[in-house]
Image: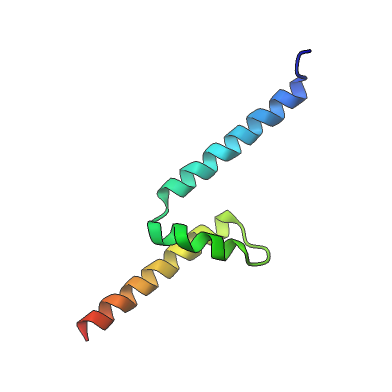
Amino acid sequence: MMPSKKAIAVLLICLVIAMASVKKAETLSDCAKECMPVCLKEKGATIDTCSPACEKYCVQITEKATKARRA
């Protein structure tokens, strides 16, 4: 039995989405990767909103740690 064209199209779309997600995950810092699961638990959160939010969070905590070491 041959899969329908619709099933093949859905499979290809899923593959493209998965590849995009992997690409985005590769560009995140280690700190942001640790932040993502926490962020994604928030109501309405998405990968697109959490990625920049986590990166900004990581910059902030890195700056605070650097300032604390200098003091």
Q: Between residues 63 and 69, which one lies in front from this camera angle?
A: 69
In the rendered image, which quarter contains the C terminus? bottom left
Here the colouring is rainbow
Q: Position of residue 41 (x, y in %)?
A: 62, 64
Q: Position of residue 35 (x, y in %)?
A: 48, 63
Residue at 70%, 24% in the rendered image: 8
* Vertical order, 8 against 57 (above or below): above
Left or right, 46 with respect to 31, comes to right
Left or right, 22 with respect to 66, comes to right
In the rendered image, which quarter contains the N terminus? top right
Q: Position of residue 47 (x, y in %)?
A: 57, 55
Residue at 74%, 26% in the rendered image: 7
- Residue 59 location, quadrant: bottom left
- Residue 31 location, quadrant: bottom left
Residue at 41%, 49% in the rendered image: 27
Left or right, 7 with respect to 26, comes to right
Residue at 20%, 82% in the rendered image: 70
